[in-house]
Image (cartoon, rainbow, N blue to C red):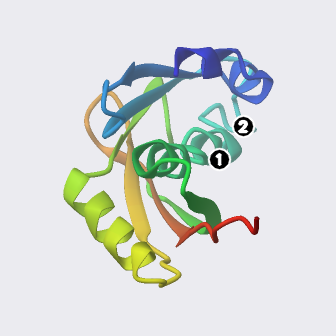
Amino acid sequence: MKWINWYPPFLGANIRVVYTAPDFQTIRVQSKLSWRNLNAVGTHFGGTLYAMCDPWFMLMLMRMLGEDYIVWDKAASIQFVRPGRGTVTATFCVTREHVDEIRARADAGEKIEPTFSVDVMDQQDQIVAHVDKVLYVRKKKPKAE
């Protein structure tokens, strides 16, 4: 997953993946405050805080479920709690049990809209922002022969 560090929007916003678990159950992303991601008052631009949280739950679930499932982002919300200064970090976790539950429901023909949450933390372990992501998941229909 380190290749994504070269993705232009992440480069521009100073966002980096710093850890990916081998099973994709955990991904940690950081953004260091720099001239590239400052807002008008000298703290992290809100768009950077959201961008660092945007793709991960979808990418993790796609990887963990496999190619037989459709996974899309459906909705998101962000609550800014305090100004982000210095380096901020977000750790994304998806449990195997949650994936198994989603898989079972999708296999039964349901369209699932699971919600995942993450907090963006500063270096003092204080919450800078809280992000909720709603995904859309269903099993792919068999291809017609």
Of label 1 and label 2, which has the lower sequence position? 2
Res 135 → quadrant: bottom right
Q: Which element carries disc 2, helix, strand or loop?
A: loop
Above or below, 113 against 95 in this view is below
| Relative image position of residue 144 (x, y in whole percent) | 75, 69
Q: Residue at x 29, y 43 (%)?
A: 126
Above or below, 62 against 74 in this view is above
In the image, what residue type sits under mark 1?
Gly
Q: Nearer the viewer, residue 50 or 126?
A: 50
Q: Nearer the viewer, residue 115 or 82?
A: 115
Q: Which element carries disc 1, helix, strand or loop?
A: helix
The single residue placed furthest to the front in the displayed view is 145
Q: Which mark is residue 121?
A: none
Quadrant occupied by the C terminus: bottom right
| Relative image position of residue 3 (x, y in whole percent) | 61, 15
In the image, what residue type sits under mark 2?
Asn
Foreground label between 1 and 2: 1
Q: Residue at x 31, y 24 (%)?
A: 22
Q: Residue at x 71, y 64 (%)?
A: 143
Other residues around mark 2 within 10 Å, as few (<14) / some (14–19) / many (≥20): few
| Relative image position of residue 87 (x, y in whole percent) | 45, 23
Above or below, 90 against 139 in this view is above
For the image, the number of numbered tags is: 2
**Residue identified by numbered label 2:** 39
Structural distance between the alpha carbons of marks 1 and 2: 8 Å
Left or right, 12 with respect to 113, comes to: right
**Residue identified by numbered label 1:** 46
Q: Residue at x 36, y 69 (%)?
A: 102
Q: Nearer the viewer, residue 51 or 102?
A: 102
- Kindly indicate whether the residue at mark 2 contacts the one at mark 1 (C-beta within 8 angstroms): yes
Other residues around mark 1 within 10 Å, as few (<14) / some (14–19) / many (≥20): some
